[in-house]
Image: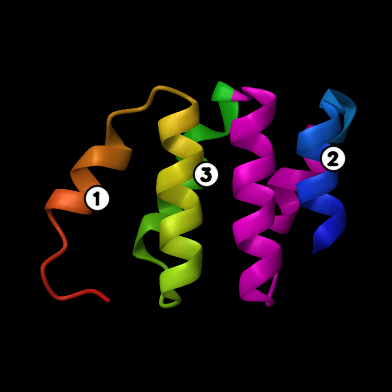
Amino acid sequence: REAAFALGRLGVTSATARLVGMLADENAWARRNAAIALGVLGRREAADDIAKLLEDEEPVVREGAAAALSLLGDDRAAKSLTGAPGKD
């Protein structure tokens, strides 16, 4: 899970497919880190996959997805923060 975050920080764009696959990982931190890495890499083609995580059961994943979408300039990040009254 830390590797996903490191790939994003290092700008390893060849890891995009692997990172998208990690968005479905059973580990919440792996999902979060993959989403953020994709955002850092500017992989806008992954925005729809990342947006699905805005409905994740884990708050840390939802927050990571919102951060990633914000990095991509996707307005679904702001909508998720203002339109989720029942979430942590």
Q: Secondary structure at mark 3?
A: helix
**Taking 5 as reference, is 47 left or right?**
left
> Overall secondary structure of the magenta stretch?
helix
Q: CA distance from mark 1 to mark 3?
A: 15 Å
In the rendered view, tell whether residue 41 sits above or below residue 87: above
Q: Earlier in the sequence, mark 2 or mark 1?
A: 2
What residue do we see at 13% from left, 50% from top?
82
In the rendered view, tell whether residue 49 sits above or below residue 12: below
The amino acid marked with disc number 2 is: Leu
Q: Which residue is mark 3?
A: 49
Bounds of the magenta segment? 16-43
Q: Which residue is mark 2?
A: 7
In the rendered view, tell whether residue 76 sits above or below residue 85: above
Q: CA distance from mark 3 to mark 2?
A: 18 Å
Q: Which residue is mark 1?
A: 80
Give the foreground label among 1 and 3.
1
* Quarter occupied by residue 56: bottom left
Q: Residues within 10 Å of mark 2 (few under 14, many from 20)?
A: many
**Taking 70 as reference, is 5 left or right?**
right
Q: Residues within 10 Å of mark 1 (few under 14, many from 20)?
A: some
What residue do we see at 80% from left, 51% from top?
4
Q: Secondary structure at mark 1?
A: helix
Q: CA distance from mark 2 to mark 1?
A: 26 Å
The amino acid marked with disc number 1 is: Ser
